[in-house]
Image (spheres, grey):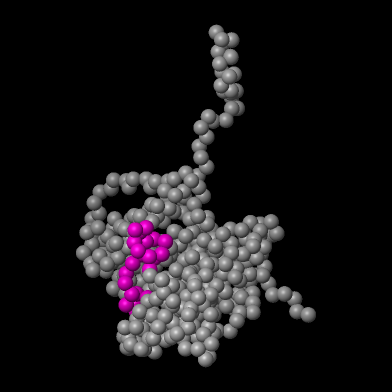
């Protein structure tokens, strides 16, 4: 009987040994999955907590949170293999409805110092949507606190960091361009709009100074950048502020995946070489409160957190200057129309306008993508020896 089965089994090349591999092996889980699933649970909890809350601030941000949840679901579906969130467990109805303080506490989840520093460990495939979702929660948290919510807290003032000199210079160029646009807009605004513009401008200059501490031979700040047109009224000034800040948000979020890739590669290189040297200017960061210094595994800790903080800073300033509420780039529905192209100040590709040229008539260049650096230069190197 066994002999009769031997021939067809041999023809099918089926192994009967105990050490034969599984006929249909389980696919390896995507390393990006856990971080996206965790963030998805947070946002799903926020959406559920907002049900039944009768407040204009909550109503204003509900479509953004729904789009945020859909973007995370889309990121899970794009993994290899795709993942789907587990159905929410059945729970009894809460004793009371959530208030603004409860929602602020939920938005603040993992936006403290350790939570922000942990973003450096994200897999590159997860980094884009997870950092954007964290930044979106920071923006909503700011709106809740402005409405009087007692919960949550401000983002901790971690040192400004970048994963490489090239990325730092790229971000500085985008900050300088947006800051110039804010300067022009503030000069033509009424007092109500001028205050948030100047507040945002001061914060952008601090971010620029912090990032500049890690860049060798940074060019001086240009005298100006091309503008899309004349700015002679408060309404034109408000449009200019909205444009330059919206472009800054896009440039910063475009740098998230290159940053995650650089950190990932540099960690591998550091493991092989026994560690990384401290970045130039690591000791020249602005002084912050002792409780804001979060112990971490290396001097570059916080590069992803800096992108989140810069995104939140630009977007909250845009909203305070009268900008419309909408999801951040990377979280917007696919069917939503993209922002119209503009010739506003953009990133470091924007050339300064010459002294003799009018910024109103100069032609601004196109926006550039974040730099990609070779593995050997993914971290800022120490200054070359003198002499």
Q: In the figure, is residue 17 to the left or right of 98?
A: right
Predominant secondary structure, magenta span: loop
Residue 196 coordinates in the image, percent (x, y): 37, 82
Would residue 114 be seen by someone viewing this image from the given angle? no
Which region shows up in magenta?
Answer: 318-339
**Residue 319 is covered by the magenta coloring:** yes
Foreground residue, 278 or 181? 181
Residue at 49 percent of width and 65 percent of height: 254
Q: Residue at x 42, y 61 (%)?
A: 330
Q: Position of residue 223 (x, y in %)?
A: 52, 87
List x then y, in percent, for residue 349: 53, 75
Closest to the observer: 238 or 292?
238
Q: Quadrant of residue 233?
A: bottom left
- Decide whether residue 182 is among the magenta residues: no
Q: Nearer the viewer, residue 50 or 13?
A: 13
Q: Work out whether 120 lies above or below 230.
A: above
């Amino acid at each position: 009987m066994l002999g009769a089965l031997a021939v067809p089994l041999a023809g099918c090349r089926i192994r009967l040994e105990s050490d034969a591999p599984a006929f249909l092996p389980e696919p390896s889980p995507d390393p990006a999955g856990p971080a996206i699933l965790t963030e998805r649970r947070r946002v799903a909890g926020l959406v559920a907590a907002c049900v039944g809350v009768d407040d204009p601030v909550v109503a204003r941000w509900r479509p953004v949170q729904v789009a945020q949840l859909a973007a995370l679901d889309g990121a899970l579906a794009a993994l290899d293999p795709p993942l789907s969130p587990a159905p929410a467990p059945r729970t009894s109805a809460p004793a009371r409805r959530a208030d603004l303080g409860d929602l602020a506490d939920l938005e603040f989840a993992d936006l403290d110092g350790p939570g922000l520093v942990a973003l450096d460990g994200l897999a590159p495939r997860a980094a884009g949507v997870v950092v954007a979702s964290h930044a979106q929660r920071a923006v909503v948290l700011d709106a809740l606190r402005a409405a009087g919510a007692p919960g949550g807290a401000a983002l901790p003032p971690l040192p400004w960091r970048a994963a490489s000199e090239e990325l730092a210079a790229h971000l500085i160029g985008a900050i300088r361009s947006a800051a110039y646009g804010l300067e022009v807009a503030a000069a033509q605004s009424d007092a109500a709009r001028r205050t948030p513009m100047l507040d945002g401008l001061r914060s952008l200059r601090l971010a620029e100074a912090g990032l500049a501490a890690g860049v060798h031979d940074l060019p001086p700040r240009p005298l100006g950048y091309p503008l899309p047109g004349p700015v002679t009224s408060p309404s034109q000034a408000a449009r200019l502020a909205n444009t330059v800040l919206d472009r800054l948000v896009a440039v910063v979020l475009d740098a998230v995946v290159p940053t995650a890739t650089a950190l990932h590669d540099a960690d591998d290189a550091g493991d092989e070489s026994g560690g990384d040297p401290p970045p130039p200017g690591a000791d020249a960061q602005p002084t912050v409160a002792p409780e804001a210094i979060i112990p971490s595994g290396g001097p570059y800790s916080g590069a992803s957190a800096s992108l989140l903080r810069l995104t939140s800073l630009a977007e909250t300033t845009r909203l305070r200057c009268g900008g419309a509420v909408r999801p951040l780039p990377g979280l917007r529905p696919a069917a939503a129309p993209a922002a119209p192209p503009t010739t506003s100040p953009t990133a470091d590709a924007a050339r300064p306008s010459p002294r003799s040229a009018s910024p109103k008539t100069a032609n601004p260049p196109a926006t550039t993508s974040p730099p990609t650096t070779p593995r050997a230069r993914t971290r800022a190197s120490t200054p070359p020896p003198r002499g």
